[in-house]
Amino acid sequence: MNLLKTFCIGGLMASALFISSCSRTVTRIDNNQQIDISGGWNNTDSRMVAEEMTNTILNASWLNDHLEQKAGKKPVVIVGMVQNKTHEHIDAETFTKDVERSFISSQKIRLVQGGKKREELRGEKADQQTNASVSTMKKFGLENGADYILQGSVNSIVDAHKREKVVSYQVNLELTNIESNEVVWIGDKKITKYVKN
């Protein structure tokens, strides 16, 4: 009987120790706080690169050239595809959203939807043609056509040996005049990280 009791107590203690070792602590942090855990591309990199590159784009000569040619009319820009060519899984949409947010905050350009969201808007407009009242129905053919499209890619180079590695990220962006296909701005931003495990 004593042996059985000792066995049960030992089992309970082992279970408590196992549960304790599996406990997880979660703490809410400021979104702007810089924390690097794996050394991979993270939200801080995305935000920093987006802010720096949009600031460079908006202070380049193409914008003044456009304003002069169009009598001060703000250019309409669409943020197109940014391809992930790195060795990591990177959600490019997060980066493009940071770029779009910076563009809108600047109030120097006008931004229009592209890709799947534009198709969804057109689908909604098509639905309104049969289901909305005539006074509230939105018409086709009144969209703001973009003057420029921003496209690019995120690339990486990894140099690793044993427990050390250096990862170099390079974001390439280029702005193209949609009517003439002329590339009016091109730039890149590099981030290099040293990781030691």
Image (tube, helix red, strand yellow):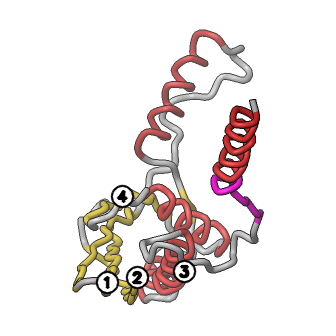
Whole-Å distance between the Cαs marked 2 and 1?
A: 5 Å
| N-term mark: 3 or 4 | 3
Q: Amino acid at mark 2?
A: Asn
Q: Position of residue 171 (x, y in %)?
A: 35, 76
Disc 1 marks a residue whose amino acid type is Arg
Q: Are marks 2 and 1 in contact (CB under 8 Å)?
A: yes
For mark 2, does the 10 Å Cα neighbourhood hold few (<14), some (14 to 19), or many (20 or more) residues?
Answer: few
> Do callouts 2 and 3 mark residues in contact (Cβ within 8 Å)?
no
For disc 4, the marked residue is 89
Q: Residue 83, percent across and down?
A: 30, 60
The residue stretch that appears in magenta: 20-28
Instruction: Inspect this view and state whether residue 73 appears.
Output: no
Disc on res. 48? 3
**Is 152 in front, or is 109?**
152
Secondary structure found at label 2: loop
Residue pushed farthest top? 130
Amino acid type for the residue under numbered disc 3 = Met
Q: Which residue is mark 1?
A: 163
- First of labels 2, 4 by sequence position: 4
Cα gap from disc 2 to disc 3, whole angstroms: 25 Å
> Which badge, 2 or 1, is on the more N-terminal residue?
1
Crowding around mark 3 (Cα neighbors within 10 Å: few <14, some 14 to 19, many 20+) is some
Q: Secondary structure at mark 1?
A: loop
Question: Residue under circle 2?
Answer: 197
- Figure quadrant of residue 160: bottom left
Which quadrant of the structure image shows residue 2? top right
User: Which circle's residue, 2 or 3, is located before the other in the chain?
Assistant: 3
Relative to 134, does residue 17 appear above or below in the rendering? Answer: below
Distance from Cα at disc 2 to Cα at disc 4: 21 Å
Quadrant (top left/top right/bottom left/bottom right) for the C terminus: bottom left
